Image (cartoon, rainbow, N blue to C red):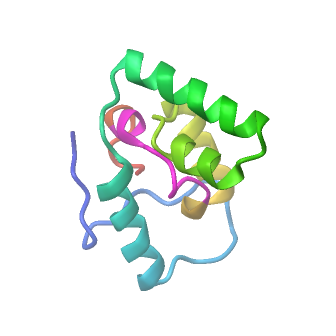
Amino acid sequence: MTVLSPTRRPNPPKYFKGEIMTEQDWEEYYADRERLDEPVPPDVEMEMLKKALEACEQSRKAEFREISSHIPCDPAWALAIKDCNGFKAVSKRNLYEAKKVYPNDF
């Protein structure tokens, strides 16, 4: 897997023409990558999904956001969201699987 550093930026979004990432935005993005991007075994992922659903059903929004941010994103979904909405739209998500499939995009 290609490891991108703050000196080597990922490929830019294809369609998003909104706000440009500042240095502080990039620092936060890489801090999120360090904190969130980790492999999750399928059985653990299923438990996380159950807990996230329960939190959602009970309107515990902060808990839902925290749990769901650690669930690995589908690579194609992550790339589409980044390309259409920019890096900030995917920065608070686990991109471990997406980085394996699209190493230069995240």
**For residue 57, side relative to residue 22 (left or right):** right
Left/right placement of residue 57 relative to residue 88 reads right
Q: Where is residue 82 in the image (x, y as percent from the top left)?
A: 58, 51
From this view, report whether residue 20 is shown above or below residue 41: below
Left/right placement of residue 23 relative to residue 83 reads left
Q: Residue furthest top?
A: 43
Q: Closest to the observer: 49 or 13?
A: 49
Q: Position of residue 80 (x, y in %)?
A: 62, 41
Residue 38, given in percent of the width and then of the height, sits at 30, 40
Residue span colored magenta: 89-99
* Residue visible at 49% across and 23% down in the picture: 47
Q: Which residue lies furthest to the bottom in this view?
A: 23
- Between 68 and 33, the one lying in front of the other is 68
Q: In this view, does 16 lie above or below 99?
A: below
User: At 59% across and 24% down in the image, what residue appears?
Assistant: 50
Is 30 inside the magenta-drawn segment?
A: no
Q: In which quarter of the image is residue 18?
A: bottom right
Q: Is residue 75 left or right of residue 101?
A: right
Position above or below: 80 against 25: above
Q: Does the magenta stretch include residue 95?
A: yes
Q: Which residue is drawn at 50% across and 30% down?
A: 48
How many marks do you count on the picture?
0
Question: Nearest the camera: 16 or 56?
Answer: 56
Q: Which residue lies furthest to the front in this view?
A: 58
**Location of residue 17 with respect to 14 vertically, above or below:** below
Q: In which quarter of the image is the N terminus?
A: top left
